[in-house]
Image (tube, rainbow, N blue to C red):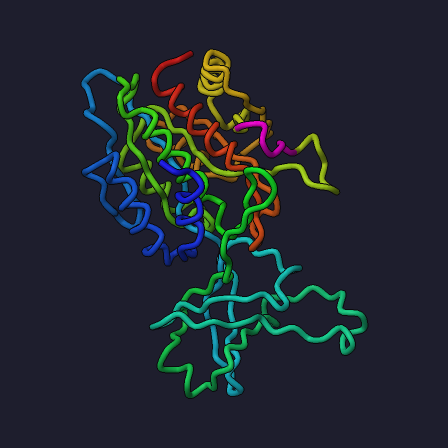
Amino acid sequence: MDIRSTVVSLSEVSGASGSESKAAQLALSMLRGYCPDAEIINGNVIGKFGTHKEGLPSLVLDAHIDQIGFAVTYITDEGFIKVGNVGGIDRRLLPAQPVVVHGSRDIKGVICSVPPHLTNGGSEVLEMDDVAIDTGLTKAELEPLVALGDSVTFDVTCRDLIGSRITCGALDDRCGVASILYALELLRDSAPAYNVTVIFSTQEEVGERGAKIGAFAVDPDIALAVDVSFAYAIGEEESKCGYLGKGPMIGISPSLSREISDGLFAAAQKSDIPCQTEVMTGMTGTNADRYSVNRCGAKTCTVSIPLRNMHTPVEVIDLNDVELTAKLLAAYIRGDK
């Protein structure tokens, strides 16, 4: 499996929360190489890995397939498309961003930007009510193509940076999907210590909704939520961040299972996999929060890939961290602890 091409393919396909079908279909086609019975159930991509054996505890590997984006709310008489945010959009970077409106066909556009000469220096942050997309089309031309509620995503392609770093949109959390796929590749010839089910869940960015129904359906004993977390960049508080290239971040939190956290650290140590500690003092803000309180509860932990510029079109990861995350997941599932 080529990790870079997998990450790039997943990250460049559109799939804003609630409109994940294209991303889900791509992930499904990849997952079926390891889970032939995989299917899409209520939006989630779900597959059982290997032969599930009686007596083994059940374990879910979860990564969310959706991304932040927008939804069309109105078309003005002048032909500008008004939108609302889907998930946590950083409004500071919106002016002049290229976007794609996913109507009956994809339509390229740009978010309008008022020149700084006309805005007292241009330091104002746009409110969502002020965001408008210019496609160059008139209202009459747009109306047959774009319906209210259609999704909009940033128009981004992945680019290589120095070394093994890349930048793209939707790396949150398509890189997590890729790490799970690579973990399954590493487990092909192994005898897992768990009955493993994979869930690529929907609508995480609007309240972990896909994980909630996926957790109820599978009812696992253990859940590992594979997501991204904050990688240190200039101006940020180092004590609250991980570092690019230094391996996955294992979560410790009162809302997580310390038993699973310790097991992941032990697996990392035994297999000589570099890792980092992420301390959270309450809820995690990830799908782990849904698994830990599902039905009678599951022993849950987060395994996060360090990422810079979260929820922007220029998210940055180190592909080595994706590989190391996969190796940690595989080591834990083999029982190397």
28 left or right, relative to 230 = left
Q: Is residue 242 magenta?
A: yes
Q: Which residues are magenta?
A: 241-247
x and y percentages locating residue 233 in the rendered image = 69, 40
Q: What secondary structure predominates along the stretch shown in magenta?
A: loop
For the N terminus, the image quarter is: top left
**Residue at the image point whose x is 37% and y is 41% from the top:** 211
Q: Write down the quadrant of residue 104 in the picture.
A: bottom left
Please determine whether, in this image, residue 258 is positioned above or below residue 69: above
Q: Write down the quadrant of residue 224 in the picture.
A: top left
**Residue at the image point whose x is 31% and y is 24% from the top:** 187
Please determine whether, in this image, residue 50 is positioned above or below residue 266: below
Q: Is residue 318 magenta?
A: no
Q: Write down the quadrant of residue 296 in the picture.
A: top left
**Residue at the image point whose x is 30% and y is 37% from the top:** 216
For the C terminus, the image quarter is: top left
Please determine whether, in this image, residue 75 is positioned above or below residue 172: below
Please determine whether, in this image, residue 255 is positioned above or below residue 311: above
Considering every residue shown, the one lying at the far right of the view is 120
x and y percentages locating residue 133 in the rendered image = 54, 73
Considering every residue shown, the one lying at the far front of the view is 163
x and y percentages locating residue 331 in the rendered image = 40, 19
Number of numbered tags placed on the structure image: 0
136 left or right, relative to 239 = left
Along the line of sight, which residue is nearer the eye, 301 or 319? 319
**Residue at the image point whose x is 66% and y is 37% from the top:** 232
Along the line of sight, which residue is nearer the eye, 163 or 120? 163
x and y percentages locating residue 161 in the rendered image = 59, 45
